[in-house]
Amino acid sequence: MLDEEDEVFKEVLSSFPARRRYLIRILQTVQHKLGYLPEEGMEKVAQHVGISEAEIFGVATFYNQFRFVPLGKYHIVVCMGTACHTMGGQLILDGFERELEVKVGGVTPDRQYSLERVGCIGCCTKAPVVVINGVIYPKMTPYKVTEVLAALRDKDTEVSEEAQ
């Protein structure tokens, strides 16, 4: 575990009583601070609340809000609600998987992009919808997938050139 992650676990665990009933709040706080739940830290949580690591993983995997993989710099969320699905949401999702060479729930090796699918974002009139770092991309098409990724890559190139 990284030193930063270790410090987060120490800080979070010291702020909650050592009781099982605080488990979900502890996990939520760790994930809020780190963006995910490092598997190496689950032993510390288990010791703190006095239950087994298996129980910790049972709780964390039961709720889909928890993730064990860090998010990419650009977290891509593809809506698969009814409206988005019927308007081509699966084609959009397939396009991101193909372009990024990563499956849903994964992150690219360079940790630039992570890909997630959700049941509904709540923008049905703009279907199909993708959200990247909180920015809504409405009326997506497979062609727009390439455009959006190219724009993100161009943005990164501009930032790195400004730093030089």
Image (cartoon, helix red, strand yellow):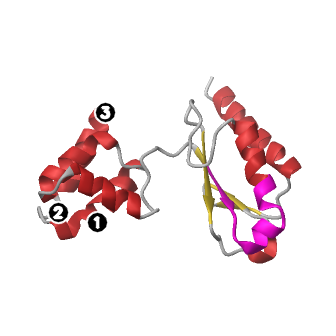
Going by the image, does 164 lie left or right of 53?
right
Rounded to the nearest angstrom, the CA distance separating label 2 from label 1 is: 9 Å
Mark 3 — residue?
A: 2
Instruction: Residue 83: give x, y in percent of width and height.
Output: 77, 73
Numbered badge on residue 51: none
Mark 2 — residue?
A: 16
Quadrant location, the N terminus? top left
Res 102 → quadrant: top right
Going by the image, does 80 lie left or right of 34?
right
**Residue 146 drawn above or below residue 132:** above
Look at the numbered discs 2 and 3 and tell me whether their residues touch, using CB distance below 8 Å: no
Residue type, numbered disc 1: Arg
Going by the image, does 120 lie left or right of 91?
left
Q: Report the number of discs.
A: 3
Look at the numbered discs 2 and 1 and tell me whether their residues touch, using CB distance below 8 Å: yes
Numbered badge on residue 25: 1
Between 87 and 136, the one lying in front of the other is 87
Residue type, numbered disc 3: Leu
Which stretch appears magenta?
75-91
